[in-house]
Amino acid sequence: MDSESNQAAGSDVESESETYERPPSSYGSMKSECDEMEKKSDEEEEGGGGIPEVVCFAAPDPPAPPVVGSQMGHSRYTETLYTEATEQTRPPDGMVIDAGSEELDDLEEAELDEDDELLTTCSPEPPEPLEMEGLPQEDESSQPGKLDPELDLPYIFKSIQEVLSRLNNDELFKFKIWFKKWEPLPVLQQILDGDVLDFVDKIIELFGQDKALTKTISTLERLEKTEEINELKTKCAKALFRFYLKEFLFRKSQITHEGVPQAGKQQFLNAVYVEPQISIRGFGGVDPSHEILTQTPKPIQVPSEDSLVALNNLFRLQKEDGSPVKTVVTTGIPGVGMSVSVAKFCLDWSEEKANRDIQYILKLSFRSLRHFRNKEYEEEGISMQEILEYCHAPIKGLKILEEENAKYIIIMDCYDCYEAPLDFQKAPEITDNNTKTHIDILIVNLIRGNLLPNARLWILGRRGAVTEIPSKFVDVVAELQGFTDEMKDDYLTKHFADAQLSAKIVRHYKRVPTIQILARQPFFTWMVSRIFKSCYKQENYGSNKPRVTPFLIHFIIIQTNRMLKFYFRKRDNEKWTKVEVNLLRMLGKMSFKMLEKNTNVFTEEDVKDVALELNEVVVFSGLCTELVPTAITGKRTFCFSHYTIQEFMAALYVFLAFYLDSKNVLESGFLPRVFSYKYNGKSAAGLVQCAVARTLGSKLGHYDMFLRYLCGLLSEHCHCNLLAGFLYSHGIPKVEGLKEVEQLLEQTIQSTPEDRKRNLYECLREMTQKDD
């Protein structure tokens, strides 16, 4: 009788395998094989209409859960180490019997009591998944690090399995039917087959562990299984909070508005992002290259190749004692791409492409923190826990950040947006996250490490602002250096679907060395892409080299508008006041004085000499930056984000004095007697005559770019179309006498040494060329 039963069972299994072959799961075949016997029982009852009777349990489609970009297209049936390990859940040669079938009753009466050791029954609770050890723990960037056990797949798998195992047969069937409604795809019919273990295996394979967990909780809510819901939420609190952060950061970071945010002009960050160079031994981030000068007046150092580090490796750096860095400050010149780098860092983490071993990444932007400086909070005070809950509500009631082994990063960007200085010397010490006090004191204690001591801080801001933080609280200062020549081309190529157009633009911008140099700033590279894309819509555009003066005008206008919006919360394209006009004119005056002194570095005293505040010049303006103090003087020094921007601002000051005040500031001071002065100094020709005299009477490169910009500003397109409405109102008469200026330049070219002719040709082209 034993042999006949075994033969019959063997033939049944054989026939079953022809109709139901389950490929190996990408998350492991974590199933007992009792599902095949259950399937046989279901097929025998097909005629009884069992399934139609249960369909009535299906409720209307629930709202679709949020979709997280980290769930990319995994292969559904890929063999993995999980498969190999979990195939051992059934003993070799063991027989699997469906505990709920009628055949079990017959076997119990006839044979089970005679030799039960020969049979391996299917337990009411499926076997527990095996703990996987020694699995790869590297991400796409080959970064080492192991996930917290409570965030890894085996723990999530086991938690879901244990909760669902407590459901009875009817509840489990209802659960499966309602779970299927989340995404009614034909492939999800498979989740109706098999036991709990097989079900959990399949949903994790299809949705990933995060979405499988949240969908399980949502479906349990429909079943009103409060106890099971609370248990699963408690067990998987870390995973649920991590899932929230991943979804939140993905949603905030996947789309980027480069340059000036405009509706409909957004891009997918991953499609256009090019990582700039980042150095941990920066000197100010200013590019010393120049079109004419071989060296700027005061040489500017650049970091060596061995100091460069990848963006996602900033928190892989180590201190001198070998311990990991805790506080990283990142800075760079305006327009170098700090905000975009933060977005890319967050996006890579949310997609599990980098820093997988970091449990959480939380953003506490200084733009958000300044909200707590209003009267309400200043009177009552606020605690660090309340700030966390305000910015990330799901953390309410959780103590996961206070655990001893917690590993997370708090990103505090836009440091220069905070509205008040922080007193690191006198602020009292606070160690309790629930202590209410002034927001300034909380920030100081967070940076000191007294609050949330396990947090790794990433602070970003312009160097003129972040120098306020005492060096003893900073482990690494990273400086964004901008694009190499290859990165510039890569950036421009990625921004255009039309390969021919991108190739034209790449060739075109390189025709003017100054534009190519300035494109080291990602923001300026974006300007190149936008301006040339518009220009190439014109017929026959590209026969002339581009002019550099319109680029610099666009640059200062955009940076000033960004200053108004970023720091002073003004609306887009809000009309400039006298304050903004005065700022640019006084910056130009300071630039002109520096040009006369032949220096590219200024100090706080120089700023005061033109009646400006240091912060509005070196932080708010978007045109200047702070240099690293030298070991000799230790004095704070500053410069423009590029030397040629200083030359342009000097030319702008001279032009505005001539155009608005009818004043020729070049007449004062020493004028070399290179040629006779035949034009009235108050005319356009007289102004250029003085500028040419200064240029030819000085060393090559001292005033050459200044002259080029001045001639460019005199062109009707620049002073009537581009500057009008910003620095002065529309309707002011255009500059007259440009024909005389043109004749002056042509005559000067004929009598000028060869080494000076090229720039004079460029000056003439800047003034007379009609297109950009």
Image (tube, helix red, strand yellow):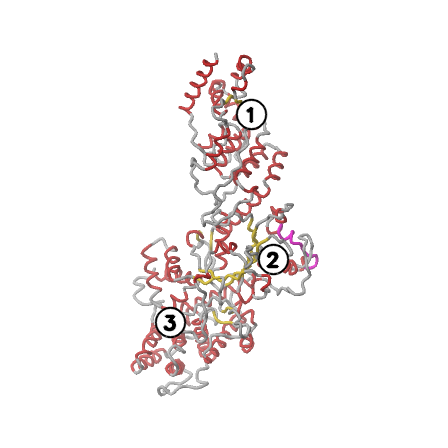
In the rendering, which numbered label is found on residue 369? 2
Tell me: residue 382, above or below residue 514.
above
Packing grade of label 1 (10 A; few <14, some 14-19, many >=20) is: few
The answer for how far apart the CA atoms under marks 3 and 2 are is: 43 Å
User: Residue 759: image x %, image y %?
Assistant: 34, 75
The answer to whether residue 64 shows anywhere in this view is no
* Residue 673 on image: x %, y %: 38, 88
Report crowding for label 3: few under 14, some 14 to 19, many 20 or more residues within 10 A (C-alpha): some
Whole-angstrom CA distance, mark 1 to mark 3, is 80 Å
Q: Is mark 3 on a helix, strand or loop?
A: loop
Residue drawn at x 56%, y 60% is: 475
User: How many neighbours does mark 2 have within 10 angstroms: few (below 14), some (14-19), or many (20 or more)?
Assistant: some
Query: Label 3: which residue?
Result: 291
Q: Is residue 447 left or right of residue 480?
A: right
- In the image, farthest residue toward the front: 321
Residue 178 among those drawn in magenta: no
Residue range (magenta): 378-389
Q: Position of residue 514 (x, y in %)?
A: 38, 69
Question: Residue, x 44% and y 21% (percent of image)?
Answer: 13
